[in-house]
Image: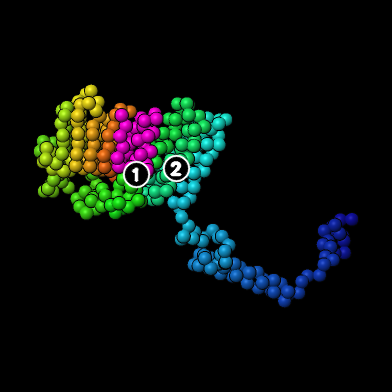
Amino acid sequence: MRLWDTPSGRDRRWVRRRSGIAPAPTYARVAVVLLALALMATLAWQGAQRLLNPAKMAGGDTTHFFTQPPSDRSVASEWQTSVSSALEEAAAQGASNVTAAEIQADRAAAILTGARTQGRVATADFFERTVVELDRVIRTHPDNDRLLEHVTLARIELAQLRSAQPAAPEGSAAGGDAGATGAAKSANPSHDVNPNAPVEVGPGTQAPHAVNIPGHVVLAAPRALAADELLDPGALHGDYIDATLMPESSEVLLPPATRVMADGVRVDGLTIAGAAQTLDAIRWKNVTFIGTRLRYEGGEISLQNVRFTNCTFGFSTDERGARLADAIALGRRSFVMQ
C-alpha cells in the first residue's frame, strides 16, 4: 500500500508513540526553576563574603585559603629549628654516611645565608647552640678533611650572621661584636650612607659622605705599612678610614710581604669601612670593621677588642679558620692564635 493510500496519509512506522510518563505540572516546573535561581544566588553571596571577610567565613580555628597566618607566628624560630634539624641529621648520618652529613651541613649553611640576607635576628644562645651542634657533627669523623671543610663553611656563615645582627647597647649580651660599633654608627648618620652608591673616582676625589667630617681619611688605594709601624689616630691624622671608594677585593692596609707577627705591625684605635682586609700578621687593637671583606689565611692572628659590623669572611676552611669563625660567632672581641 502506498503512503497516500493510508487513512491518515502517513506511514504507520512514523507514528509517534505516546509516552508512558505524564508531563510534570506547570507549577512544579516553575518551582524547580525558582529553586535553582535561589541556589545560584546563595552561592554568589557566599563567594562575595569570602572575598570581603575571609577570616569570618573560615570559622573558628579552621585553616582557610584566604586566612592570614597568625601574627604571633615566629618566622625566626622556624629557620632556627631548620638549622638545628639539619645539624642533628648531619650528626646522626656522620658515623655511617659522611656524604649525607656533608649535605646536611651545607643545608644548614644555606639556611644561615638566607637568614642573613633576609635580616633575621637571633639571640646569643642560638649562636652558642649552633656552635655546639657543629662540634657534634665534626666529632663523628674528626680526621675527615672534607667533612671539616663543609662544617667550617657553616661556621663561617654563622659568623657572618652574627656580624649582621642589629646594633645593641654597649655591654649587651645580644649585641656581641656588633654592639658598640652599631651604636656609634647610628649616632653619626654619615656612616649610614650606602657605600655602594656610584661615585666618580680620580685624583683628589672624596667620598661624598666623608666631606667635612672630622676624623675621616679617605683612601682610594691601599696603604703600605712598614715593619714595626703603629697606625693609630695620631699617625693617620684621623680615626676613620673610609675605603668605600676602593674595589671590594682591594686590601686597605698592606703589611710587609713576609706576613708574620714578628714584623711588629700594629693598628690601634681605628674604624675601617669598605674594601677588604687580611687579618694575618697584624696586631689589631680597639678596631672596628664596617662592611669589610675580611680574609684569614691561616697564619698568626691577634685581635684585642675588635668588632665586626656587616662584614663578610673569607677564612681558610681548616681547623684554624674554624676556631676564628667560632670566636666571631660567639661574640668574642679578643682572640689570639699563634
SS under mark 1 = loop
Q: Which residue is mark 1?
A: 331
Residue 83 horizontal/vertical position (percent): 47, 43
Residue 228 horizontal/vertical position (percent): 16, 29
At x 52%, y 30%, the residue is: 98
Where is residue 24, by image quadrant?
bottom right
Where is residue 276, by image quadrant?
top left
Residue nearer the viewer, 28 or 42:
42
Give the residue type at disc 2. Answer: Thr
| CB contact under 8 Å: marks 1 and 2 | no
* Magenta span of residues: 310-338
Residue 291 appears in the rendering? no
Q: Quadrant of the N terminus?
A: bottom right
Q: Residue furthest top?
A: 258
Location of residue 338 with respect to 14 vertically, above or below: above
Give the residue type at disc 1. Answer: Gly
Residue 201 horizontal/vertical position (percent): 16, 37
Q: Is residue 274 magenta?
A: no
Residue nearer the viewer, 303 or 220:
303
Mark 1, residues whose alpha carbon is within 10 Å: few (<14), some, or many (≥20)? many
Q: Which residue is mark 2?
A: 130
Q: Quadrant of the C terminus?
A: top left
SS under mark 2 = helix
Residue 203 appears in the rendering? yes
